[in-house]
Every structure is written in structure tokens, then in C-alpha cells.
Amino acid sequence: MKIKPVLMDHIQTRHTSYEVDFLLETNVTFIIGDSGTGKSAVFSFLQELAAEDKRIRCFNYLDQKKNYKSTIRQSKGKLFIIDNADILLDDALRWHIATDGQNQYIIIGRNPTGLMLNQDEIMELSSQTKEGRTTFRLIHSF
């Protein structure tokens, strides 16, 4: 269900010799990719950014026992970055995310089922190293 970004259309951060430079074209961006492509590293870089930018909230498998579901349901004006989505997102939360027009999502996982996404909302992580700096970007997966 394609909705334009409600909070950010670009997110960028640097960590040592790494840079994350994402153009966000839709309200829900689902990132897929093989193991070892940098998804977890990118999540940690964005988690550092979230410490400075209170609009950003990050959740991963370490939050399984925390009340992240009600935080997502009750929030407005947040960019949620969710790693390990296949573990964290049940069907009800996937439905909430798919219909939420008040928050924005970057979701990292393998299974986008239940999020009602179009092909242009499912992205792959791409990295390029130049002059000792690795930049992570999103590319369309199809």
C-alpha cells in the first residue's frame, strides 16, 4: 500500500568509514538481502542516529520482551526502524504498519507478507567502497 513518506524522504548518517544514504520514496521501506550484506551494521548506525534524533525509534530482536508493539501503535510522527522483522512483527502489527499514515517505517527482514507492499517498496541494500569509505544505499529489488 504505497504512501509517500510522512516524516523523512532522506536519511543519512556516518560512522567511522561507513555512510548510510537512503532515499525514502514510500512510507514503508522493506529491506531484504542475503546474510553478510550489511543490514545489521546499517541498523546499528541508524540506532546511533536515533540517539540524537528523537523522531527515530529502533527495535530489534533484543526488544522481544519489551513493549515495542504498544509503542508503535500509540506513536505519531516517528520513523520506526525495525531489524529482525520476521521475529518481531506478528500479523496484527503488520496490518497496523500497512495502514498507519502517521508514522514511517524502515523494516529489515526476509518476509514482507502482510504489509501490503508494492514491488517498489521492497528494496535491497547496496554498498560501494570508494577511497576507504563504504556507502550503503537502497536499490529496487525487482
Image: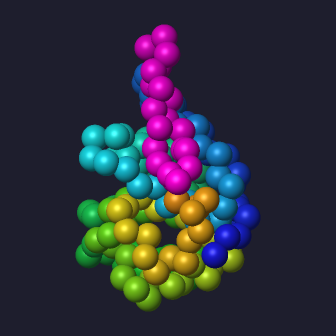
Extreme-top residue of the structure: 131
Up-down: is 119 above or below 23? below
Up-down: is 11 above or below 105? above
Residue at x 61%, y 82% (from the top left corner): 99
Q: Quadrant of residue 64?
A: bottom left
Residue 21 drawn at (x, y percent): 58, 37
Residue 114 drawn at (x, y percent): 46, 81
Residue at x 67%, y 70% (from the top left corner): 2
Q: As drawn, is 141 to the left or to the right of 65?
A: right
Q: Quadrant of residue 17?
A: top left
Up-down: is 44 above or below 133? below
In terms of depth relative to the viewer, which is nearer, 29 or 76?
29
- Magenta-colored stretch includes residue 125: yes
- Magenta-colored stretch includes residue 34: no
For the magenta stretch, what is the residue range?
123-142
Residue 116 drawn at (x, y percent): 55, 78
Up-down: is 18 above or below 119? above
Residue at x 61%, y 59% (from the top left corner): 120
Quarter of the image that includes the N terminus: bottom right
